[in-house]
Image (cartoon, rainbow, N blue to C red):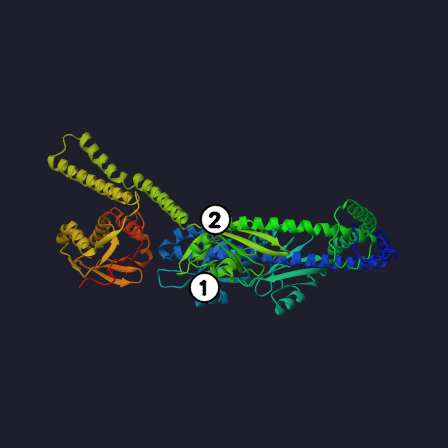
Amino acid sequence: MSSRPAGLDLARPVPTIRQRLNALVLSAALPAAIFAAVALGTGYWMAWRAVESSLTAAAASLSSAMDNRLLRLQTGLQAFALAEAVDPATLPRLRSHAMEFQRTMDAVNMVLVREDGAQVLNTLVPEGRLLPHEPPSAFREEVLRTQQPVIRNMFRGPVLGDWLSAIGVPARSTDGQRYVLGASLTPHQLQAVLAEQELPEGWVATVLDRQDVIAARMPDQRFVGLPAEPALREALRLRPGGVAMMTNLAGAQALTAYHRSPATGWTVSIGIPRDALWQPLLRTLGWLAAAALLTLLGSLALARKLGGRIADAMAGLARTATHPGSAGQTPPRLVFREAVEVAGVLAATDRQLRAALSASDSSRARLRAIIDTAVDAVIVLGPDHRIEVFNPAAAAMFGRPPDVVMGQPLQVLVPDWVAVQDELDWQTTSLRGLRSDGESFPVQASVSRGLAEGQGFLTVILRDVTQEERTRDELLRSNEDLQRFASVASHDMRSPLRTLQGFLGVMAEQPALPAERRQDLVHRCLRAVRQLDHLTGSLLAFARLNAQAARLQPVALDDVAQEALALVQASIDEAGATVQLGPLPRVWGVHGELVQLLQNLIANAVHYRREGIPPRVEVQAVAVAAGWRLSVRDNGIGIAPEYHRKVFGIFERLHAQREYTGSGIGLATCARIAERHGGRIWVESRLGEGATFHVELPAVDAALPA
């Protein structure tokens, strides 16, 4: 049987591939020339655009660097003004701090000016010398009026007599006067920012203030204090950034990119002289022309060579074909003799493809079995980024059956998928999943891209890492607690030991001490021992909370409150306190830990009381969405809002031991107990108005006992 398709008239001459390619080579000369011309023009345009893009990027980068320099000084000034209140009685100390700040921030000087223009501090004027009086200034008035930092335009400094720029911020004072604290920079200091960018040789960089006056220039400081060239000022009036050919102040044509910062209002421009610009462009165009010519010649030679190889290869395929084509098929219109011979080979290839498809079906069945039994969620997204495969592990993880999510985008399950889908390819990242009940949970996502039947698809493998994150958080918290334990071991626990050592040393060195003096030293030693014992016991109790996981059981808070009151009854009686218990529910918890929590909160309410006011403590519970909120309210000294979070840190004390004794562990223990119960604790208070501590606990009953 012949391998040639039926119906073809081979008597009619059919050109070979080699003959067709020879004709193509002959007709390619004119289009190639046109292509070369277009390539040269395109190369010139692209080179010019590349220069403009590079210049624009450099101007934006330099503007950002200048912003960082000015805003870093502004932020430092604000921090200094908040930390140092102006007090005429302590001006020498303020001057010392200002000079240290000046050195740190690399400013030329620091000035403190009163509202009426009188300078009360100037680090450039030696201490004791008469300070200059500044005339009325819109800069100073703006700072005092807005109470916000202001970056000043270029001005002549009264002390240096040179051009300066300055930043001013409002300063706090103790004498009722209003002050402006300022720091100045010279053009040379601004030029240093330009020099750090390491611009190419021949480029000219200029910094303009908000009035378009030159504040600094590189490579030299010519024209500082003069207005910028008219063309640049007009361009800035129209838009804050761009690039154009302009005449600079030196009278030379330069391609200039400029960028005005929205943060400071200052402008940075970078210019390349026209003569320096043309030479690299012409050199680039020359290389492009040479490359285009070489490419054209090489392509023509390669086309002839490849044509011969294709013809030889197709003839070889025809000679090695052993299977006839399928009968009854209508042959396509073939143009080349070699293609006619290959048509017979395609018939045999068709049968081989059918066998391969059968094997592919078996492979797909095995792959499906692997996906269905995988412990991780496996999700396949089609070309339209909608779900096509959703394995049982994914259904269990998200709580949604496959028929509900099929055809949906992945963001219904992973909301932040849209932001990362184009960036991931054989990479692993952390995302947040969303279960059917609305619960958000962490997942580790691995993504691979594939191609099937000419269309792309994504395979997304998700693993629930909730337990891993909890374990990591526990390790981080344990490490932090260990660090604090080390801190207290080196400080808090050594303090009573030093007291014991000192008093015992006195008794050892002076055996003839009077009995009354010796008895006093013994009592002090006992107090130090009790303090050390209390601190050690508190540390042990806190450490036990981290020893093992909490096993929650139904607990009646009424019983817990009675036990806690019994443990602190002596302190209640001593302080003349009143403790009122409201109806309390049952919650899920550990009985002993909840007793410890209430004991600490009630003891603190009694301990931190106001002088002359009997303590009053109220314990109540209200139902909330998370379960029950247990509240302990007192009328004590209160806590300032800035310490509401700090008080729950281990060994965090807001008062010295001589004011209010304590270990600094009680509220940290309460916070740990609340966390172990799946709840949280916080405080609502104002200084001098008492405090209310709230603890949320999981509920057993939905209502209070009757």
Q: Nearer the viewer, mark 2 or mark 1?
A: 2
Residue found at the far left of this picture: 515
- The location of residue 506, given as percent across then percent down, is 20, 33
* SS type, badge 2: loop
> Taking 239 as reference, is 364 above or below it?
above
Give the quarter of the figure containing the C terminus.
Answer: bottom left
Residue 480 versus residue 157: which sits nearer the camera?
480
Residue that mark 2 sits on: 374
Residue 240 falls in image quadrant: bottom right
- The location of residue 359, given as percent across then percent down, is 61, 48
Residue 75 versus residue 315: which sits nearer the camera?
315
Give the left or right position of residue 411, taking residue 639 as reference: right
Q: CA distance from mark 2 to mark 1?
A: 60 Å
Q: Is residue 232 visible?
A: yes
Residue 164 versus residue 473: which sits nearer the camera?
473
Residue that mark 1 sits on: 148
Q: Amino acid at mark 2?
A: Ala
Instruction: Point out the tag, 2 or 1, that comes first from the N-terminus.
Output: 1
- The location of residue 252, given as percent across then percent down, is 72, 60
All told, the count of numbered labels is: 2
Give the left or right position of residue 440, taking residue 209 as reference: left
